[in-house]
Amino acid sequence: MIKNVYYHLSDFNTALNIQRDINAIKKNVPVFNIKKIQPGIENVILIIGESERKQNMSLYGYNKKTTPYTDEQAGNMMIFDHAISPAGITNLSVPLMLSSIHPDEFRYRYDKLSYNIINMANQSGYNSFWLSTQASARGITAIASMSKNKKWVNGYDEVIVPELQKVIQKKEDKFVVLHIMGSHPNPCNRLPSNWNSGDLNCYDSSIKYTDYVFKNIFSTLKNTNSVIIYTSDHGLKIQGDKLLHVDSKESTQVPFFVWFGDKVPANYRITGHETKQTQTTYIYPLIMKYMGLEMPLHYKNEGNKYLNLEMKSMDYNTLPE
């Protein structure tokens, strides 16, 4: 499709707004009160998926084998059985996951996105990396811009694996965000032409392809002191025979797990299933934990090492079914 002048104007305005967000955040870099209480994990990897329904993953009991490689690793994971995203759309959920901004502040105080996990990592002695196969987006790109190293890569999601392999060769503490396309609508467009989907539809095939990317990431990090935290930005709502990209309760139900490399110290290696409802905004203090930092008091909970007590989300009860 050839874009007309109105499309170009829209692109220009979007880019202008993103740059304004970045400038506002750069002017408001906070000084974190950070207390290091133990050595952190060398490679802290956060993978942000896209539009992945846990209901369509065999890891979560789906009757089609859509996540065979991840299934094999289940014994080496902490799997959150009832994870909830803070919103059903990307431009809300991802900034809320990566920062301590409150949803009520999101619309009018973009500058508060500076209180994010990238700036936290930068001030904690970690070299920060943002590797993405996704295009720019307000809020997300603003946070990504705080990374010391950032790269947007063209191609299907597997192209991000060689970039990760280069990064982990560096002998230093590293915090790496991989922002992938996953199952973003249209899922048929997320698959290489030579990808063998078998009898799966495009959506299930996109999940199986993401699982193939995970296989290569797991293999890359197996013999290292690395932790992978994975969640999807949101799920999708089923209506009839259609999958809808809308803000709804169903769209906030997401996969969420933690995987450990072989050289992760035993004090960090906690596996099994968390059966209580957990917000994916818990990623923020969880990353602090893996960096060896003291977690804020309001995230601590006796008898449950993972549950986020502060449910920082849009008003879940007001979302449509």
Image (cartoon, rainbow, N blue to C red):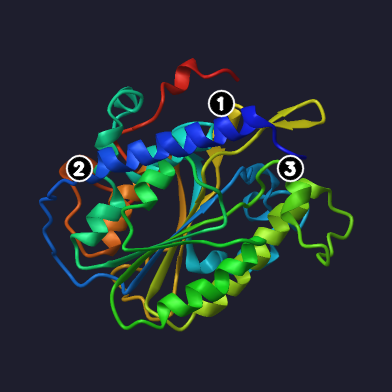
Q: Position of residue 227 (x, y in %)?
A: 40, 68
In-image side of 242 versus 169 (left or right): right
Q: Residues within 10 Å of mark 3 (few under 14, many from 20)?
A: few
Whether residue 304 can be seen here: no
- The residue mark sitting in front, 1 or 2, is 2
Quadrant (top left, top right, bottom left, bottom right) of the C terminus: top right
Q: Which residue is mark 3?
A: 186
- The residue mark sitting in front, 1 or 3, is 3
Q: Amino acid at mark 2?
A: Lys
Given the current orientation, which residue lies at the most extreme front position?
Answer: 5
Marks 1 and 3, how far apart in space? Answer: 17 Å
Q: Work out whether mark 2 precedes mark 3 in sequence or the reverse, and give the earlier one.
A: 2
Q: Position of residue 39 (x, y in %)?
A: 20, 72
Q: Amino acid at mark 1?
A: Asp
Q: Mark on residue 27?
A: 2
Q: Residues within 10 Å of mark 2 (few under 14, many from 20)?
A: few
Q: Which residue is mark 1?
A: 247
Residue 171 figure quarter: bottom left
Tell whether label 2 touches label 1 (CB within 8 Å): no
